Image (cartoon, grey):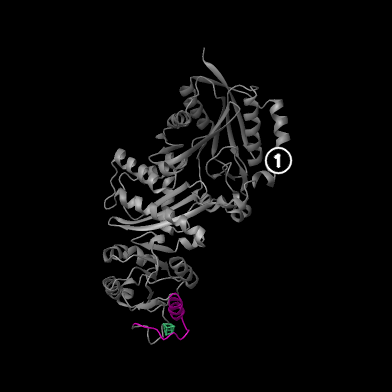
């Protein structure tokens, strides 16, 4: 006879109520007091839920959530932070670990649960499939995330279904690692997510979605479902636990002091386009929490970058592991990204993770977004001979604006930087245009210079990185402070040395870099 599981539909509850009820049900399952149970849940008001081990301050934009009536709470399960709109639907399964339908291996459990829910969504006419490790995707775009935890032989496994999702609110509520991404690239983050509304035009009525999921789980586990209300014991325990799950002690229990998630970024100019990598890394465990690979290259199929991101998530942020994952991905998937090789992707990721080494050396993460390596990792640029300064940082009225040199009159940051260079026993040279830069670097290399430190804007670095590599003198470049000719669309004038606006050197960061390279 077919086994029957309990179906518990608790409707819309607050974040604290839902989290408290998770614990109630898991504990009762662990004590053998409730049958296998599938629960449907929703959240009202909307909320953000951090993973069990995450710090709220690191994951959530608190001010935005507070001023927009978004509740904040902590899941029992691990994984990353989630935003839940009022229309999203959650499903949960409470079951014994030794139940004959439960796979023993964790990966198999994730697969079985994910395939069950994906099978359910397909009954709605959505082409949903499980994607390792824990997503359900439609044409490469995530429509559902899953995760689980266990307690004394009982398993709680849960998943979301994005029904009518507001991704703009999610991007504002969560600290997605977009610090270095521009508007266009943030837009591309949206291509990674979908919802039933986007797939079907209108979201199906909620009872239909629930029925489809029940069909998916029923088929996969060979069970039927019997709707039942919360039991009196469950209600009592929920009431008892609610104050704790509503308390700051619980929600904020992983404190700011343990802050160790850092966002690291890099840009890499491949022949096929600019690659930007932005990753959130747990600096203690060196695990990648999240990674975004964006840029103006073309990938075929389009989803493959999203699939690669999913594989890299939760991987070790080490060069060897990244190489392993990317190489296996290219070997299996035969992806086509014209002008972007697996080595280009690996290098761009390695350059992001090498910034971890700068953190104990007095650089904060914000500072690391403004440093660009030339030819060698930062740590291998020792005792640079020369500081190269861009003409566009000179006063627009300065007599030296259109010629090399600086009178150190104190009116702009170029003079201060030149003095700073001298204090490290280095020369400073101002660079008037791109040809001047190339000639200067070649000359320096010819005369046996070891390396250089320079300043330029990020777009200049992005564009000329292949030139720096061709010339072959290692160095560190420090971003300038102000809006640049590239941002203003005046790069032609800048290349000729005719850019009339003034940029500003980031003197504190230059000082730190010189101390680091001479330390
Ligand atoms: S500090 Fe040098 S570059 Fe700046 S205005 Fe004075 S002379 Fe010109």
Q: Is residue 298 visible?
A: no
- Residue 397 lies, in percent from the top left, at 41, 86
- Residue 103 lies, in percent from the top left, at 48, 25
- Residue 175 lies, in percent from the top left, at 53, 52
Depth order, front residue of 159/320: 320
Estimate how packed mark 1 is, as few (under 14), some (14 to 19) or many (20 or more) residues with alpha carbons within 10 Å: few
- Residue 203 lies, in percent from the top left, at 48, 38
Magenta residue check for 406: yes
Give, as a single range, the part of the protein colored magenta: 404-424
Instruction: Give the quarter of the image for residue 275.
Output: bottom left
Residue at the spot x=46%, y=61% of the render? 368
- Quadrant location, ligand no. 1: bottom left
Relative to residue 496, is residue 42 drawn left or right?
Answer: right
Question: Is 151 situated above or below 353?
Answer: above
Residue at the spot x=48%, y=58% of the render? 179
Instruction: Give the quarter of the image for residue 226.
Output: top right
Depth order, front residue of 416/393: 416
Instruction: Give the quarter of the image for residue 414.
Output: bottom left
Q: Is residue 91 visible?
A: yes
Question: Is 381 situated above or below 283?
Answer: below
Residue at label 1? 244
């Amino acid at each position: 006879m077919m086994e029957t599981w309990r179906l518990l539909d608790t409707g819309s509850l607050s974040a604290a109520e839902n989290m408290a009820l998770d614990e109630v049900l898991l504990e009762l399952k662990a004590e053998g007091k409730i049958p296998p149970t599938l629960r449907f849940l929703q959240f009202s008001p909307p909320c953000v839920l951090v993973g069990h081990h995450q710090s709220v301050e690191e994951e959530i934009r608190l001010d935005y959530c507070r001023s927009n009536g978004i509740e904040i709470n902590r899941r029992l399960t691990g994984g990353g932070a989630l935003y839940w709109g009022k229309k999203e639907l959650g499903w949960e399964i409470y079951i014994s670990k030794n139940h004959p339908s439960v796979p023993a291996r964790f990966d198999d459990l994730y697969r079985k649960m994910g395939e069950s829910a994906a099978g359910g969504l397909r009954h709605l006419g959505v082409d949903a499939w499980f994607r390792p490790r824990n997503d359900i995707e439609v044409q490469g775009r995530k429509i559902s995330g899953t995760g689980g935890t266990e307690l004394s032989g009982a398993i709680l496994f849960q998943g979301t279904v994005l029904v009518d999702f507001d991704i703009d609110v999610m991007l504002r509520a969560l600290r997605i690692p977009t610090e270095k991404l521009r508007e266009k690239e943030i837009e591309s983050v949206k291509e990674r997510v979908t919802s039933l509304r986007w797939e079907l035009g209108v979201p199906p009525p909620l009872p239909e979605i629930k029925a489809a999921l029940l069909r998916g789980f029923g088929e996969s586990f060979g069970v039927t479902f019997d709707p039942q209300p919360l039991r009196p014991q469950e209600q009592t325990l929920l009431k008892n636990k609610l104050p704790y799950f509503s308390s700051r002690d619980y929600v904020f229990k992983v404190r700011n002091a343990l802050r160790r998630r850092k966002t690291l970024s890099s840009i890499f100019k491949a022949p096929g386009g600019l690659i930007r990598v932005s990753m959130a890394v747990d600096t203690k465990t060196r695990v990648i929490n999240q990674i975004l690979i964006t840029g103006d290259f073309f990938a075929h199929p389009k989803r493959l970058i999203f699939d690669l991101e999913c594989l890299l998530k939760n991987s070790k942020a080490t060069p060897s592991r990244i190489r392993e994952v990317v190489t296996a991905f290219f070997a299996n998937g035969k992806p086509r990204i014209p002008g972007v090789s697996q080595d280009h992707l690996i290098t761009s990721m390695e350059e992001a993770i090498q910034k971890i080494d700068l953190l104990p050396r007095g650089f904060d993460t914000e500072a690391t977004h403004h440093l660009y390596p030339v030819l060698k990792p930062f740590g291998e640029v020792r005792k640079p001979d020369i500081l190269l300064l861009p003409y566009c940082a000179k006063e627009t009225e300065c007599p030296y604006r259109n010629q090399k040199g600086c009178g150190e009159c104190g009116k702009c940051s170029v003079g201060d930087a030149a003095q700073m260079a001298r204090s490290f026993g280095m020369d400073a040279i101002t660079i008037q245009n791109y040809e001047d830069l190339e000639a200067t670097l070649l000359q320096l290399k010819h005369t046996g210079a070891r390396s250089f430190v320079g300043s330029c804007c990020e777009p200049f670095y992005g564009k000329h990185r292949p030139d720096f590599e061709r010339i072959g003198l290692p160095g560190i470049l420090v971003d300038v402070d102000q809006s640049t000719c590239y941002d203003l669309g005046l790069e032609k004038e800048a290349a000729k040395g005719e850019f009339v606006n003034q940029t500003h050197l980031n003197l504190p960061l230059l000082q730190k870099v010189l101390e680091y390279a001479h330390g």
